[in-house]
Amino acid sequence: MMNHRRTAPAAVRAAKTVVLVVSVLVVLSASPASAASVELTAAVCPEAPPGMQTFANDVTAWVKWGVLALIGIGAVISLGSILVGRIFSHPHASRYGAMGVAVVVMVAITYTVILVILDSITGSGCT
């Protein structure tokens, strides 16, 4: 037995869709009459607690140099792995070295982005 359903013509369905979309846009774009535009700007600058700024600067500097050292060590080891794999015809070492170089590049990019984000959060002065 066949199931016969009546379907509306395409023009009627399209008209219903247009009416629905327009009504939703009108409702979403309407603003309440009592809503006043209030500008919220925080005039509070982030700063370290008293006596903590030098300690925070030291820790930040140590972490920056530590991460830079690890990126450099990772790059040297990865390039060395590629070289050893090519010299001794060991394809796995070359492949792992190439993946290591790719990871080191991604870590370096992430490191740079994280530094910019942290600087924008704790930067000097209020904006």
Image (cartoon, rainbow, N blue to C red):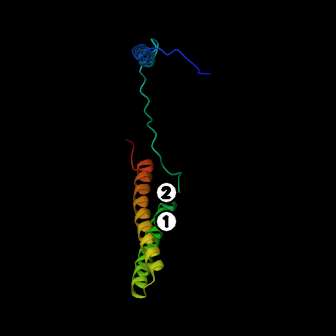
Check disc 2 and report the residue beneath it. Answer: 53
Q: Residue furthest right?
A: 1
Q: Is residue 71 visible?
A: no
Question: Which residue corresponds to the image point at 55% horizontal and 17% vertical from the top-left?
Answer: 5
Q: Residue furthest front?
A: 1
| Callout 2 amino acid | Gln
Query: On the rendered image, what quadrant is the C terminus found in?
Result: top left
Residue 116 is situated, as x and y percent measured from the top left of the image, at: 40, 54
Examine the rendered structure and indicate whether residue 107 appears above or below residue 22. below
The one of 23 and 65 positioned closer to us in this rendering = 23
State the separation of the CA atoms marked 2 and 1. 15 Å
Residue 83 is situated, as x and y percent measured from the top left of the image, at: 39, 83
Badge 2 local density, few (<14 within 10 Å), some, or many (20+)? few
Residue 113 is situated, as x and y percent measured from the top left of the image, at: 41, 55
| Callout 1 amino acid | Val
* Sooner in the amino-acid sequence: mark 2 or mark 1: 2
Which picture quadrant has residue 26? top left
SS of the residue under disc 1:
helix
Check disc 1 and report the residue beneath it. Answer: 63
Q: Is residue 120 visible?
A: yes
Examine the rendered structure and indicate whether residue 51 appears above or below residue 7. below
